[in-house]
Image (tube, rainbow, N blue to C red):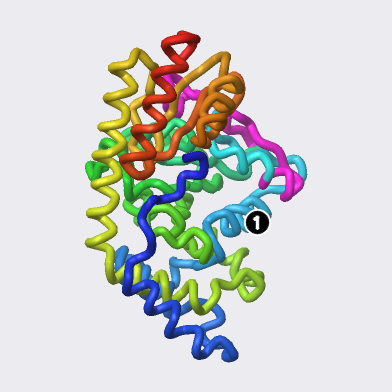
Amino acid sequence: MSLNETCYPPLESVRRAVLDTTAEAHRTLDALGTGLAGTIAEHLGVPAGDVLVGPGSGALLQQLFSACTGPETVTVHAWPSWEAYPMMAANAGSGTVRVPLRDDVHDLDAMADAVTDATGMVLICNPNNPTGTTVGHGALRRFLDRLSPDVTVLIDEAYLDFADRDPEAAAHGVELYRDDERVCVVRTFSKSYGLLSLRVGYLVGHERVLAPLRGVQPFFRVSAAGQAAAIAAIAGHDEIRVRCATTAEERERLRGILLEQGLRVTPSQANFLWLPMESGVEAFTQFCADHGVLVCGKPGEGVRVTVAEREANDAFALLAGKFHAVDGGI
């Protein structure tokens, strides 16, 4: 329950597609993933040229950091957020400006204030990892209105499929990209689609954002098996939506149990829950581990727990309740 993996295996159609592809593993096939990009574009209703596929959203994020930032530039993002962002910035020879969350939510006003001439990119994780909180369409639109025309705004939507479909509850970055050349969106097949180890992700953006990345695309390929899996997964999107809705229901059930036990739990729109903790993180995560449950602890900040099978969720709730009854710190 520490890595935000889905508890659902790939769809049977996905497994068949992967197996069928192995028969041609000795061939180059669609090296640049143009077929997958076209399928994604049709699914989203965007031009095929505005989609770039890559081996997971992490690889695409690293490419963007390298293209949009560098020495003497910074990326503005919220904190806490995904811990890989500062590492990716360092890999690109740049830095970050971490803007503290306000009530566990992106403080968009403070983030806009933090943007300067040295800002190469602004990054919004929506839903945010590790808090699961979101910003809505209107708030994000007002935020964009405050930024200069030359800054790149990247919206990381790894967990959007688990969120409320109302764009005012959780903005859909693709809708903002349509009329704003500064905006690009990164998504992954690792979470809701359950293709984590196959490494498939994609960017949606305008040519000004994607052009610098195309030169290295041949070296950041998606495997043929990954492409086939992703195409089959998109064909099964309706079933994936049902799975995501079930996960969201289980998330709310688990949060309700934890709240009844007196724990603090941030409202989430992702497939995980966030328990804010200023102290005791190490003791709590070790207590859970000693009883066979692994959760993600961030010392001084809190604990993130992935929504898993019902039995696993109940096991975690039982441990959290016992720890809270003795320690009282969560």
Measured from the top left, where is residue 104 in percent x and y?
44, 24
Total labels: the figure holds 1
SS at badge 1: helix
Q: Which is more toward the observer, 43 or 117?
A: 43
Image quadrant of residue 174?
A: bottom left
Camera sees residue 114: yes
Residue found 54% across the figure and 34% down from its top: 296
Q: Is residue 66 magenta?
A: no
Image quadrant of residue 133?
A: top left
Residue found 47% across the figure and 20% down from its top: 276
Q: Which is more toward the observer, 285 or 104?
A: 285
Relative height, residue 16 to residue 160 (above, below): below
Q: Is residue 134 left or right of residue 90?
A: left
Measured from the top left, where is residue 53 in percent x and y?
50, 67
Q: Amino acid at mark 1?
A: Ala
Residue found 73% across the figure and 49% down from its top: 91
Q: Is residue 129 left or right of residue 169?
A: right
Q: Is residue 103 magenta?
A: yes
Q: Which is more toward the observer, 102 or 256?
A: 256
Residue that carries the numbered disc 1 in the rendered image = 67
User: Which class describes the residues within 10 Å of circle 1: few (<14), some (14-19), or many (20+)?
Assistant: some
Residue found 42% across the figure and 11% down from its top: 325
Measured from the top left, where is residue 294 in percent x and y?
52, 36
Magenta segment range? 88-117
Q: Which is more toward the observer, 296 or 69?
A: 296
Image quadrant of residue 60?
A: bottom right
Measured from the top left, where is residue 26 in percent x and y?
59, 90
Camera sees residue 144: no
